[in-house]
């Protein structure tokens, strides 16, 4: 009975929905803020709360005027949140892509806000807990999977005295199979090096740290990092 009442569009239910949006958005944003991501506490709260307000407004228009599509405005939120998420995705000088998880988190936070806005409290809170679990608990699992992968992309700055062909031969001698070499326009250090990205596949099972250490010891390698 109580749950049915808070699903109806009243002042009390509106206050409850917006407060829940602030709480859930804050929990998700707090985790991102701890990791110093582009979108943190306030951004997540605003996204979740804004989506909630849009859904409440959509429900009001539909009920008050008995016209319109009850999910039309929410559909615009789902597609429109993309511009905000895209702003958190950056490509670094070494072609590293960062911010995808933050962008996905913003989108999921908006979806949580829409569920709260229409009064689906169970879906919103279960979904919010699941999203938080993915951002926190599964983070370590994801790192573990990446560490066990035999294929990785590396950014290399090589002394010009050593040709890329010689570097490739050294990779094969150390039981690596290189592919997808992409030359950079200019290295970040100086004009004495040639910079490029290369995909390396280890023929034997090795950890990422061991792979990087082995390549870093090769002749001519001035700088190396995982891309």
Image (tube, rainbow, N blue to C red):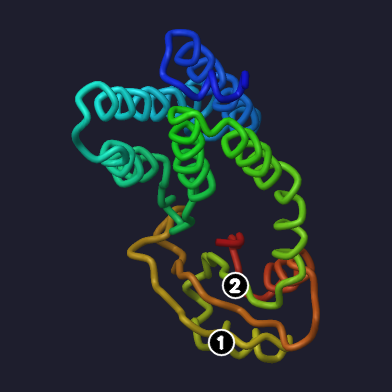
Left or right placement of residue 70 versus residue 220 in this view: left
Element class at badge 2: loop
Q: Position of residue 145 (x, y in %)?
A: 74, 65
Residue beneath disc 1: 166
Left or right placement of residue 169 versus residue 116 in this view: right
Q: Residues within 10 Å of mark 2 (few under 14, many from 20)?
A: some
CB atoms at circles 2 and 1 under 8 Å apart?
A: yes
Q: Quadrant of residue 32 in the image?
A: top right
Quarter that holds the C terminus:
bottom right
Viewer-proximal residue among 216 and 30: 30
Residue name at image x 76 percent, y 56 percent: 141
Q: Position of residue 220 (x, y in %)?
A: 60, 72
Q: How many marks?
A: 2
Element class at badge 1: helix
Q: Position of residue 29 (x, y in %)?
A: 57, 28
How much space separates mark 2 and mark 1, taking CA atoms?
9 Å
Residue name at image x 49 percent, y 15 percent: 13
Q: Position of residue 209 (x, y in %)?
A: 76, 63
Q: Is residue 76 above or below residue 144?
A: above
Residue beneath disc 2: 220
Q: Is residue 1 above or below residue 164?
A: above
Left or right placement of residue 156 versus residue 55 in this view: right
Viewer-proximal residue among 49 and 100: 49
């Amino acid at each position: 009975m109580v749950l049915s009442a808070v699903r109806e569009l009243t002042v009390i239910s509106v206050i409850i929905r917006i407060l829940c949006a602030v709480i859930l958005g804050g929990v998700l944003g707090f985790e991102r803020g701890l990791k110093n991501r582009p979108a943190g506490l306030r951004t997540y709260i605003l996204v979740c709360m804004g989506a909630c307000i849009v859904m409440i407004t959509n429900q009001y228009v539909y009920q008050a005027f008995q016209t319109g599509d009850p999910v039309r405005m929410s559909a615009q939120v789902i597609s429109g949140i993309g511009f905000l998420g895209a702003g958190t995705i950056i490509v670094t000088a070494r072609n590293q892509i960062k911010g995808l998880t933050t962008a996905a988190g913003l989108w999921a936070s908006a979806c949580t806000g829409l569920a709260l806005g229409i009064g689906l409290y169970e879906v919103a809170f279960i979904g919010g807990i699941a999203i938080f679990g993915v951002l926190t608990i599964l983070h370590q699992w994801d790192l573990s999977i990446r560490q066990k992968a035999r294929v990785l992309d590396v950014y290399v700055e090589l002394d010009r005295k050593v040709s890329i062909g010689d570097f490739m031969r050294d990779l094969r001698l150390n039981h690596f199979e290189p592919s997808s070499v992409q030359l950079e326009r200019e290295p970040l250090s100086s004009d004495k090096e040639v910079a490029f990205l290369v995909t390396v596949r280890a023929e034997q099972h090795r950890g990422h740290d061991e792979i990087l250490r082995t390549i870093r010891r090769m002749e001519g390698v001035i700088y190396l990092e995982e891309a």
